[in-house]
Amino acid sequence: MATWLAPSAGFYLLPTRVWELMLGAVLMLKRPPPLNNRFLMEMVGLAGFGLLAIGFFAISESDPFPGYNALYPCLGTTLLIYVGQNSPSTIASRILEVRPLVLIGLISYSLYLVHWPINAFAHYLSLQNLDPSMTIAMTVASFALAAFSWKYIEQPFRQKRSFTAPLPIFAFSAGAIALVCVGGAAGALGNGFPQRFPEYAQQRIPAGDWLEGTCFNEGSSRIESWNIEDCTRTRGFATTVLLWGDSFAAHYVSGLEANKKKIQANVVEYTYAGCPPILSYFSYARPDCIRFNQKALEIIRDAGIKTVVLSGRWTDYEARSFDGLQQTIDKLRGRGVRVFVIGQSPQFITDVRKIAFFAKRRNSDDTYWPMAMDPDINNRMRSFTKGATFIDPLKFLCSAGRCPYADAGEFLYFDYGHFSSVGAILAISKYWPVLATDNALAVTK
């Protein structure tokens, strides 16, 4: 439940993860006896590898974790340890006895501790995706530091004779923990001390009002309170268009009014955080997406809407949802609806204010920065939008994998990828089509 109701707490806090540790504790304390059948023990070992493989290859970024998905790697590891304890001659045990794997196992805990700080600092200092050479260098550094930590910190700590006076050790550890807690609390209460960077951290970037009210849903109660009158963002035209999607559809709203003469349509906003405009989409983290998307069909029917614009953060859904996108388009086309699909807009590795700060430290006036996403995603999307008009924002905003995060001193985004008011106005002016229609279906592209 915590995985869906409080994802961060469910991931980081001990009460929701303790069962994973208990699996190992049971193996150590109870030492379950081996099965009498050699074939069954072989199958248990292979099942362990199979569960680990599922954890590696079947779980995507959009799947809830830990939750039930943590069962695959945890149970797989448990089965392998069980087999190794009781049947060292099985195939699984012999594979894990290969010397390089044993060495990795010896330093694995130290490797677990050191790899993330190295990774985090490398990204923090570059603020962009790392190239393969840097990734290799980070991997080598992680293994080297882990081996050093294992030999000179972990091993001495495991030997009781290295610590003859427990009280000073306890006092030092308690003091270090208290210092970390005080520093962490101060940083949290002080919001990271933004006064260090007054020219950026204190700057509020206008984003419009789309985050407020009932037109942008963030909870199930707003679905029922949504109404077309309040959520019609531009008025005075003969054509009515539905803008349907997640927050990466909603972020265009603040640019609609300034571009309404170009659009030539009454644009109705119907958006929900984390819910792509895909009828078959289901997420444990957002169980209301099914109801939200089904209601879109009711809105289209009841309001007689003949043009729909679909937009979303497609990078989150590619692993499982592009087939569903084509099915959604087919269903809309079957109802005589003209469909526009807006592809993925630029995303950066962090807040654009941080990028601007780092650029200034490097004495750079360049407001272009590498995008933190695969630039080919829209090319892959295009094949799943047959019967719709597909629009690729990256072709209008970016060049050679780099995109502007500011223009004429104004930020185009208010975070890592949602358009600011200035950015939304610019984006719509560059690539939104004229939406006025005679109710004819769009030409397939």
Image (cartoon, helix red, strand yellow):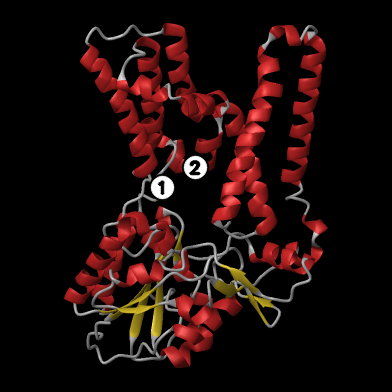
**Cα distance, mark 1 to mark 2?**
8 Å
Q: Quadrant of residue 331?
A: bottom left
**Looking at the picture, does residue 374 appear above or below residue 171?**
below
Picture coordinates of residue 274 (x, y %)?
Answer: 43, 57
Query: In the rendered structure, which amino acid carries the disc numbered 2?
Result: Pro
Residue 55 vs residue 199, the one in the foreground: 55
Picture coordinates of residue 212 (x, y %)?
Answer: 53, 65
Query: In the rendered structure, which amino acid carries the disc numbered 1?
Result: Ala
The earlier-in-sequence mark between 1 and 2 is 2
Q: Residue at x 41, y 36 (%)?
A: 67
Count the labels in the image: 2
Image quarter of the N terminus: top left
Image-based side of 241 in relation to 185, left or right: left
**Looking at the picture, does residue 383 appear above or below residue 186?**
below
Residue 67 vs residue 298, the one in the foreground: 67
SS state under label 2: helix
Would you call the spot at circle 2 few (<14 residues within 10 Å), some (14-19), or many (20 or more)?
Answer: some
Image-based side of 150 in relation to 92, left or right: right
Image quarter of the C terminus: bottom left
Would you call the spot at circle 1 few (<14 residues within 10 Å), some (14-19), or many (20 or more)?
Answer: many
The residue beneath circle 2 is 7
- CB under 8 Å between callouts 1 and 2? yes
Picture coordinates of residue 313 (x, y %)?
Answer: 44, 64
**Looking at the picture, does residue 383 appear above or below residue 237?**
above
The residue beneath circle 1 is 285
Residue 279 vs residue 86, the one in the foreground: 86
